[in-house]
Image: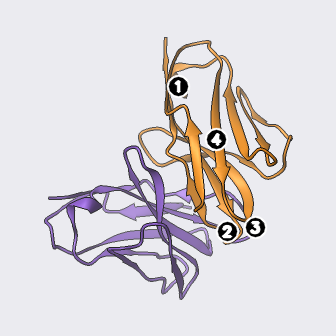
Chain colours: A orange, B purple
Amino acid sequence: EDKVVQSPLSLVVHEGDTVTLNCSYEVTNFRSLLWYKQEKKAPTFLFMLTSSGIEKKSGRLSSILDKKELFSILNITATQTGDSAVYLCAVRNNTDKLIFGTGTRLQVFP
Amino acid sequence: NAGVTQTPKFQVLKTGQSMTLQCAQDMNHEYMSWYRQDPGMGLRLIHYSVGAGITDQGEVPNGYNVSRSTTEDFPLRLLSAAPSQTSVYFCASSQWGTSETQYFGPGTRLLVL
């Protein structure tokens, strides 16, 4: 059975801290891995990763994929209160199905 | 472009009632899907469609029906609502095979009493 597991489930930090969110997967016919940010609304797209070892970066957020060990990490440096959200990891297979993890809830306090 | 739109935003049903959650997109996307999101369960795929006239089951299809008569619309039907279907429902669309980005609608919050 395909599954995506995220850790930790919840994280509380202070502004300025750096956080690392983890996503491991067991998915048949892997095609890509996606990260989303969800505040109190629909998820918004962050990154899409298909190749191992190539870092994707957007401002203070970055992500990398390891297809050998079947995991990805999402890093957020110099966190801000606006980074507080649930971060979702999803893996797409070759039939275009997206399998989501349960998410990591990040709370950033001033 | 309006993107992906969903109606209603919020609905209360009694057990056994039926209703249809509407989803429409104006981006000419072939791929559309329905998810439900429950606390601690993440997003789970209910049904999806790779084009007009083609639908398939996702992870949790029981209790839901879909149809795709046009590229733009992908309604989700609950034939006999149950309290276990209380959830937030998201519709999403993307370009089949060319773009990995899924665009999500704003969600429908459903409460079944």
| Image coords of residue B89 (percent x, y) | 38, 59
Residue at the image point whose x is 64% and y is 41% from the top: A23
Would you call the spot at circle 4 few (<14 residues within 10 Å), some (14-19), or many (20 or more)?
A: many
From this view, report whether residue B100 is shown above or below residue A51: below
- Check contact, mark 4 vs mark 3: CB within 8 A: no
Mark-to-mark CA distance, 1 and 4: 22 Å
Tag 4 residue: A23
Element at badge 3? Answer: loop
- Check contact, mark 2 vs mark 1: CB within 8 A: no
Would you call the spot at circle 1 few (<14 residues within 10 Å), some (14-19), or many (20 or more)?
A: few
- Give me the disc on residue A82: 1
Instruction: Tell me whether marks 2 and 1 sit on the same chain.
Output: no
Report the amino acid beneath label 4: Cys
Residue at the image point whose x is 27% and y is 57% from the top: B86
Tag 3 residue: B98
| Image coords of residue A96 (percent x, y) | 65, 68
- Give the number of marks: 4
Mark-to-mark CA distance, 3 and 1: 31 Å
Element at badge 4? Answer: strand
Element at badge 2? Answer: loop
From this view, report whether residue A25 is shown above or below residue B51: above
Instruction: Tell me whether marks 2 and 3 sit on the same chain.
Output: yes
- Give me the disc on residue B95: 2
- Check contact, mark 3 vs mark 1: CB within 8 A: no
